[in-house]
Image (spheres, rainbow, N blue to C red):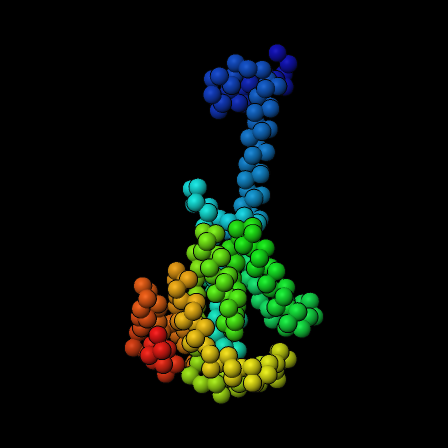
Amino acid sequence: MPPAANFFEKKFDKKLPKHFIKIGLLRKYQIISIYIQRVIKFWSRFFKSERGLGRSPKNPRKIGNYKMKYYTIIAGVNGTGKSSLTGSFKARMSDLGFVIDVDKIAAVSRLSLVGAGRVAVKRISECLEKGISFTQETTLSGNKTVNTAKSARERGYKVRLCYVGLNSLDESLKRIRNRVEKGGHDIDSGTVGRRYANRFVMLKKLLPFCDDVELYDNENGFVLVAQYRNGELLTVGDYQPDWLVRLRDFL
C-alpha cells in the first residue's frame, strides 16, 4: 500500500465504522467530502436565516412539520409612537419577519406617503403569497388591515395586534409637530382628527380577527395597560389611562 494511503488508513480506521474500512480509499474520500459539504450547507443556511442574522426569512420558520407564520400589527393614530414601539420589538423579538414601514419606504424610495402606501400593500400581498411572517404599522384608517387579518388567518397565520394609545388629539398633534421639526414627515391635522375620532370603531372591527392583543399607553413611555382575550378587555396593573377607560366603555 502506498505510504499516503497507509497514513490515511491509520488516521481514520479508528474513527470510521468498520463497514467504511471495507470499501475503497476513494469511497472514503467521497463520503467524507459529502459529509463536509452537508455541514457547510447547514451552517450557511443557518447564518442566512432569521435565527442567524435576524433577517426576514425567505421561508417561514418550522417547528416539526408546522410552519410558524406571524402577522404582527402595530396600530395607533398618527403621533402615538408606532415606529418607536416597532424598534423596541426588533431588539427583543426574532419572529417579526419582514417589517413593512410606510415612512421608511417613503424615505428610501423618495415617494409620497400615498405612493409608499401602494408599495406597502404590494409587499403585504407578496408576504402572504410566500407564507412569510411580516409586521405592519398602521393607523387603522380603513378596512385594509381588517381584510389582511382575515386573509392571513385563512392562510394559517397567527395574527398579533399591538395597539398604542394617547389620551388626547392635542398630544398626537404636538408629537407630529415635534417630528416635523426634526425633519420627519407631516400629516394634515384634519386627517389626524378624523382618524382619532374613529379609532375605536376601526379597532373594534379588527379585534375578532386577532389571536393576541396587547394595548400600550405612551404618555410617558410605553406601558402595557391591557390585553384582549376571549372577547374581553383585561387590564394589566393598576394604571388605567383615560383612553383605555373610554375604549372599555365603547366595547
**Depth check, front residue: 33 or 164:** 164
Is 92 left, or right, of 4 in this rendering?
Answer: left
Identify the residue at the far right of this view: 110
| Residue 150 seen anywhere in this rendered image of the structure | yes
Is 222 left, or right, of 116 in this rendering?
Answer: left
**Depth check, front residue: 144 or 242:** 144
Residue at the spot x=63%, y=64% of the render?
Answer: 119
Residue at the spot x=51%, y=55% of the render?
Answer: 133
| Residue 86 seen anywhere in this rendered image of the structure | no
Residue at the spot x=43%, y=75% of the render?
Answer: 201
**Residue 1 position in % (x across, y down):** 61, 11
Seen in the picture, residue 221 relative to 66 is either above or below; the reply is below
Where on the picture, by quarter, is residue 226? Answer: bottom left
**Residue 121 position in % (x across, y down):** 59, 63
Residue at the spot x=49%, y=88% of the render?
Answer: 170
- Image quadrant occupied by the C terminus: bottom left
**Depth check, front residue: 8 or 168:** 168
Seen in the picture, residue 44 relative to 143 is either above or below; the reply is above
Where on the picture, by quarter, is residue 228? Answer: bottom left
